[in-house]
Image (cartoon, rainbow, N blue to C red):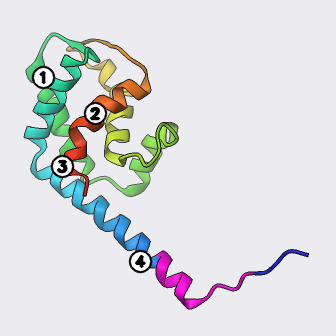
């Protein structure tokens, strides 16, 4: 017969504390990304070009596009972010949700940008390049 676990108060407190901490980290990252969008976008585009992930006719247009995305993601609902990153959730252990979001953005949306000629690399290569820049804002 299966053992029935009753939820006790200390377990609930621990779970709530973990949830609060994750929410605080998420809010911190989104706020930091919004405030430093231009700087992060510049570093991100440079890294993607250095790693030969994207090929573009305009670095400036890419910086502007990533600045826009970093500012917009701060205002998005959690459901929309989770929906976007769902295909990549199991890509790596302890993933950075913002890096996953931008990776999926590059794979799905950026490739359609008129200034993007090609996107190279697999999902993990793109995630590694994006996360190498965004890990600086992860608490």
Q: Is residue 72 magenta?
A: no
Q: Are marks 4 and 1 in contact (CB under 8 Å)?
A: no
Callout in the foreground (1, 3): 3
Q: Earlier in the sequence, mark 1 or mark 3?
A: 3
Q: Is residue 11 magenta?
A: yes
Give the number of the mark in front: 2 or 3: 2
Marks 1/3: CA–CA distance: 19 Å
> To which residue does mark 4 refer?
17
Secondary structure found at label 2: helix
Image quadrant in which the N terminus is located: bottom right
Q: How far across and down, in percent of the image, does residue 21 sit?
A: 35, 70
**The C terminus appears in which quarter of the rendering?**
bottom left
Q: Residues within 10 Å of mark 1 (few under 14, many from 20)?
A: some
> How far is the residue under mark 3 from the one under mark 4?
24 Å
Tell whether label 2 touches label 1 (CB within 8 Å): no
> Which of the two labelled residues, at mark 4 and mark 1, occupies the earlier sequence position?
4
User: What residue is at 19 percent from the left and 18 percent from the top?
Assistant: 49
**Nearer-N-terminus badge (3/4):** 4
x, y (%) of residue 112? 32, 19
N-term mark: 1 or 2: 1
Magenta stretch prevailing secondary structure: helix
The residue at which mark 1 appears reads as 61
User: Which quadrant holds residue 54?
Assistant: top left
**Point 11% across, 19% down: residue:** 59
Residue pointed to by mark 3 = 33
Circle 4 or circle 1, nearest the eye: 4
- Tell me the magenta residue range: 5-15
3D distance between C-alphas at marks 2 and 4: 29 Å
């Amino acid at each position: 017969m299966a053992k029935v676990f009753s939820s006790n108060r200390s377990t609930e407190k621990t779970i709530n504390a973990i949830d609060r901490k994750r929410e605080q980290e998420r809010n911190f990252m989104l706020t930091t990304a919004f405030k430093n969008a231009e700087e992060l976008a510049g570093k991100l585009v440079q890294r993607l070009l250095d790693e030969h992930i994207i090929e573009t006719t305009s670095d400036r247009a890419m910086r502007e596009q990533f600045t826009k995305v970093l500012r917009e993601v701060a205002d998005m609902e959690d459901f929309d972010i989770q929906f976007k990153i769902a295909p990549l959730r199991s890509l790596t252990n302890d993933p950075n949700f913002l890096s996953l979001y931008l990776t999926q953005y590059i794979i799905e949306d950026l490739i359609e940008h008129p200034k993007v000629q090609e996107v190279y690399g697999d999902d993990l290569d793109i995630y590694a390049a994006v996360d190498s820049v965004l890990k600086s804002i992860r608490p």
